[in-house]
Image (cartoon, grey):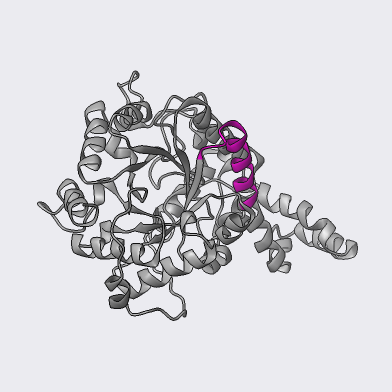
């Protein structure tokens, strides 16, 4: 998830006018809440999540099962998160499914794609991909030249990336993997396939399906793959000249060909989305594939290489969930309305509501706005951060108020 402060210049109807036509809750409306992994720290906590969400009128849980390159489900691929140490028999996803099914609720597995750790000390488990595959990690522009000739297995490699993330926590959430690396793509397709095969889910949900910032990825593997990718797209003599220049400067291709460099990075993310969609639908055609996306698609595609407009258009994403996290009612309306225009159908948009930033009254107002715009659902971020207010308006109490005021 991401607190978003993008803006567009599109005109927007008066918020009051939108609210005056707010539709009542519909029986088939998606009323979802994102459940972050720390809310599933024990069987008792997992049961309470479902109980509280159901009592609040929510009918769908989007449960974070891959938070930081780990698994809150039975996985043959990735280790369990460290906060579940000492509970080897506890399967958070399966327990949530059992409790939710008993209440008639839908469950979607939430997968963080490229964000895999930090910014803290590296994970302890030797099988975690940060330790097992440091060559998969994305590298910022500021470090690419320095790390180009450093063996990723040298402890200094990960340490430099971790230090960078810690120093830039305002713009980078932690360590990301490289979207273009074949190993990263194979791992993520396998994670989605494992979930689709192993659990009776209603859907699977992409998150962090984007670059950390446009200053990534300058890892050696990505720079070399770009050289090969661009070769048939430029004149042979220019490619040879850039190869010569790259002997002294690994950024030669990226800096000489900025448009192609951006397209390559954008295509890397979209290629994964396509592969995941095909793998999931082949195994479980009825699963719904959704994604949390930055709310303004042009900015998302340009700066984070998240081209969700194209994913919807080509049919490799069933539902977009724009993270319309704002306290500004006009901005919220503009983002959700624009997403509906892009999607072309109410069934293909659920509005992401940033309840963690709002008092409860504003969260309810934004849910009503989304209904008036005409999208088919809302997703509240998040179960354990349902309000900016301290107790008694914090988390559980706020969730109940949202339900009573918006879903009854």
| Quadrant of residue 83 within the rendered picture | top left
Looking at the image, which residue is at 50% across and 56% down? 212
Q: Dividing the picture into quarters, in which one does residue 64 lie?
A: top left
Q: Is residue 274 magenta?
A: yes
Residue 357: x %, y % from top left: 26, 61
Any part of residue 152 in sight: no
x and y percentages locating residue 31 in the rendered image: 33, 49
Q: Residue at x 54, y 63 (%)?
A: 344
Relative height, residue 119 to residue 237 (above, below): above
Residue placed farthest to the top in the image?
89
Give the residue drawn at x 17%, y 48%.
400
Using residue 57 as the reference point, say whether residue 282 is left or right of it. right
* Residue 400 seen from this side: yes
- For this rendering, which residue is in front, 189 or 32? 32
**Is 381 rendered above or below residue 153?**
below
Quick one: 94 or 252, which is closer to the camera? 94
Q: Quadrant of residue 190?
A: top right
Is residue 359 toward the left or the right of residue 111 in the image?
Answer: left
Residue furthest right in the image:
237
In the figure, is residue 236 to the left or right of 219? right
Q: Position of residue 87 (x, y in %)?
A: 30, 21
Main secondary structure of the magenta stretch? helix
Looking at the picture, does residue 386 appear above or below residue 53?
below
**Which stretch did the figure color magenta?**
270-287
Of residues 4 and 383, the one drawn nearer to the viewer in this rendering = 383
Give coordinates of residue 98: x percent, y percent.
33, 26
Please tell me whether residue 60 belongs to the stretch shown in magenta: no
């Amino acid at each position: 998830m991401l607190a978003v402060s993008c803006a567009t210049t599109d005109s927007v109807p008066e918020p009051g006018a939108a609210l005056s036509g707010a539709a009542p809750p519909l029986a088939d409306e998606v009323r979802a809440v994102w459940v972050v992994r720390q809310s599933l720290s024990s069987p008792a906590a997992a049961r309470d999540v479902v109980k509280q969400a159901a009592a609040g009128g929510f009918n769908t849980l989007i449960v974070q099962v891959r938070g930081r390159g780990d698994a809150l489900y039975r996985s043959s691929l990735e280790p369990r998160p460290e906060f579940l140490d000492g509970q080897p028999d506890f399967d958070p996803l399966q327990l949530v499914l059992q409790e939710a099914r008993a209440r008639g609720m839908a469950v979607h597995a939430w997968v963080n794609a490229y964000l895999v750790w930090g910014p803290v000390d590296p994970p302890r488990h030797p099988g975690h991909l940060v330790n097992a595959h440091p060559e998969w990690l994305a590298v910022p522009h500021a470090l690419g030249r320095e790390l180009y000739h450093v063996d990723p297995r040298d402890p200094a490699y990960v340490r430099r990336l971790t230090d960078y993330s810690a120093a830039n926590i305002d713009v980078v959430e932690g360590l990301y993997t490289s979207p273009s690396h074949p190993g990263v793509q194979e791992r993520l397709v396998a994670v989605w396939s494992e979930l689709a095969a192993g659990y009776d889910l209603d859907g699977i949900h992409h998150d962090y399906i984007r670059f950390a910032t446009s200053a990534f990825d300058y890892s050696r593997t990505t720079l070399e793959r770009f050289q090969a990718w661009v070769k048939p797209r430029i004149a042979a003599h220019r490619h040879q000249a850039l190869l010569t220049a790259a002997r002294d400067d690994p950024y030669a291709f990226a800096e000489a060909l900025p448009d192609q460099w951006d397209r390559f990075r954008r295509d890397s993310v979209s290629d994964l989305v396509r592969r995941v969609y095909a793998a999931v639908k082949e195994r479980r055609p009825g699963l719904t594939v959704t994604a949390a996306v930055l709310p303004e698609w042009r900015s998302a595609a340009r700066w984070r290489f998240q081209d969700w407009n194209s994913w919807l258009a080509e049919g490799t994403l069933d539902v977009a969930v724009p993270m319309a996290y704002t306290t500004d009612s006009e901005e919220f309306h503009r983002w959700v309305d624009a997403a509906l225009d892009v999607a072309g159908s109410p069934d293909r948009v659920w509005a992401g509501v940033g309840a963690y930033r709002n008092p409860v009254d504003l969260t309810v107002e934004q849910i009503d706005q989304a209904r008036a715009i005409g999208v088919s659902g809302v997703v509240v971020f998040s179960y354990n951060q349902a309000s900016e207010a301290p107790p008694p308006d914090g988390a559980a109490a706020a969730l109940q108020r949202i339900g009573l005021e918006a879903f009854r």
